Amino acid sequence: MPVSAQNPEAILRRLEWTVVRRLDGLLQGDYRTLFRGFGLDLAGLREYQSGDDVRYIDWNVTARLQTPYVRQYVEDREVTAWFLLDLSPSVDFGTVQTLKRSLLIDFVTVLARLLTRHGNRVGAILYADKVNGVIPAQGGRTQVLRLTNELLLQPSLRHAPLTDLAALLAAALRTLRRRSLVFIVSDFISAPGWHKPLGMLAQRHEVLAVRLYDPREMALPDIGPLILEDAETGEQLYVDTHDKHFRRRFVEAARRREYALKVAFDRAGVDVLALSTEDDLAQEIVRFATLRKQQQKAPAAFAASRVHGLSPARSAIDGLDTSLG
């Protein structure tokens, strides 16, 4: 079904059943691992009492003491979260089942719902061929529906100037006055010049980069002659995917791009959640939360591993090397 033909209420209900409920079980209510420094702070532990929420049971302590213990939290402060959303033509690439645009809408809807149901506010800045809209931060389920509806109404541009993420980040620097939680949701296919404003934004706010990709952007299948078209400029190129040397050059170019992105994010001190059009959204969010928890426990070791260990997309590329020989 085309993205524009979907209904925001139906999307939210689907995601509440298929993703949000699963996250409740998998994270056991521990959403603070997603948003370091925001939301809930651990106040202590006490023995489990009848009527306590089982999601807050600390299973490690319970196993050690052979008695159920629950975690107690105190509210830190209200979170204001902003989604910086790249809706340029390249996000309309993907499989028949899932486009990067559809993945973007699902992610925003899920995270907005998780945040607003805990009393937090969410807003968005939209970019297509330019910054073309700001949705002020508000709370409640109605705000989630508004965000989803606005995304569904955004047209898919046939062609546009090369994406300039620097313009989107500069708009955020002008718009966000108070410290906020910022999600940059993009495939990061952009003109150069966005690294500096990303670093500036990360100094003022907690910034998470959500990198959208499709596996076919990492390696071409061996299916014969193709005409490839640049989603943004419309430029076309005839290629023969039977040529293993061309396919290898394609993989090498993708690897260089992955490394350049990794360096940019590391220099800015920004954590990255890489989402593929073939990923299970709930599982990837949980994996990301687990990595952030490990980072909090051993920040130095984790930082060192990040220099060399790239996103899942890079792992997928590395696994292709032997098949191209």
Image (spheres, rainbow, N blue to C red):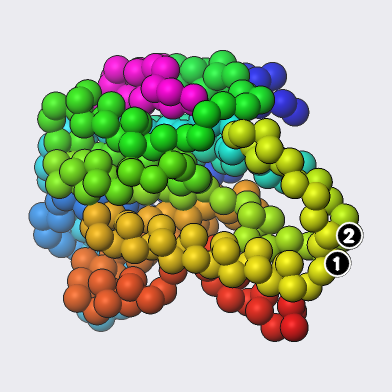
Which of 219 and 238 lies nearest the eye of the viewer? 238
The answer to which image quadrant residue 124 occupies is top left
| Magenta residues, start to end | 118-143
Drawn side of residue 212 relative to residue 46, left or right: right
Q: Could you tell me which quadrant the N terminus lies in?
A: top right
How many badges with numbers are in the image?
2
Residue 8, visible in the rendered structure:
no
What amino acid type is highlighted by mark number 2? Gly
**Label 1: which residue?**
242
Q: Position of residue 37 (x, y in %)?
A: 16, 50
Magenta includes 1? no
**Does residue 191 sit above or below 157 in this rendering?**
below
Mark 1 closeness class: few <14, some 14–19, many ≥20 residues within 10 Å: some
Q: Residue at x 37, y 41 (%)?
A: 184
**Does residue 151 sit above or below 267 in this rendering?**
above
Where disc 1 sits, the SS reads: loop
Q: Position of residue 18 (x, y in %)?
A: 58, 43
Contact between marks 1 and 2 (CB within 8 A): the answer is yes
Which of 295 and 125 lies nearest the eye of the viewer? 125
Residue 236, visible in the rendered structure:
yes
Drawn side of residue 245 relative to residue 11, left or right: right
Q: Residue at x 62, y 61 (%)?
A: 218
Nearest to N terminus: mark 1 or mark 2? 2
Q: Position of residue 176 (x, y in %)?
A: 20, 28
Where disc 2 sits, the SS reads: loop
**Label 2: which residue?**
224
